[in-house]
Amino acid sequence: MTLPKKSRKVIVVDGVTFHWTRGKIPENMWVTVQHGSGHGSLLRIDLYGVPLPNDIADGIRFALRSGWVPESAGEMFYLGFTDVPKHNRFVVRSKDSPDFWREF
């Protein structure tokens, strides 16, 4: 699945190009990220507030360290944003239960 061209933006993280788009519901905001090739698995980062480029880049780096392989086909990888210091800003979410968090 490729992100729609109309609303996608480009971000380069450590020399690799990614496309991203944001979604919004009243109480939350998220971004969906995909490798710049348009192929592979998606990354969803749930945020609180308006996503800044630095937040998105940090989320991509965290996801890569946590096991997301953007060039490989597979299920969406979920991250949550947190301001709890021990979490280092991001935590990996389970696709099956939005209330389950796995710390890295």
Image (cartoon, rainbow, N blue to C red):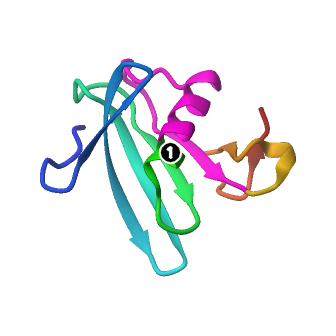
For residue 52, side relative to residue 95 (left or right): left
Q: Is mark 1 on a helix, strand or loop?
A: helix
- Counting from the top left corner in percent of width and height, residue 33 is at 38, 41
Residue beneath the point at 65% across and 57% down: 98
* Three-letter code, disc 1: Asn
For residue 56, side relative to residue 65 (left or right): left
- Counting from the top left corner in percent of width and height, residue 63 is at 57, 31
Q: Label 1: which residue? A: 54
- Counting from the top left corner in percent of width and height, residue 54 is at 50, 45
Q: Which of 74 and 4 is in front in this view?
A: 4
Q: Does 63 appear above or below 16?
A: below
The residue sitting at the bottom extreme is 26
Q: Nearer the viewer, residue 78 or 89?
A: 89
Residue beneath the point at 56% across and 38% down: 58
Q: What stretch is highlighted in magenta?
A: 57-82
Q: Does 79 appear above or below 63?
A: below
Q: Is residue 15 magenta?
A: no
Judge the density around disc 1: few (<14), some (14-19), many (≥20) Cα neighbours within 10 Å: few
Q: Quadrant of residue 67?
A: top right
Q: Nearer the viewer, residue 95 or 51?
A: 51
Residue beneath the point at 53% across and 71% down: 28
Let me know if residue 36 appears in the view: yes
The residue sitting at the left extreme is 6
Q: In which quarter of the image is residue 88?
A: top right
For residue 9, side relative to residue 22 (left or right): left
Which corner quadrant holds the C terminus? top right
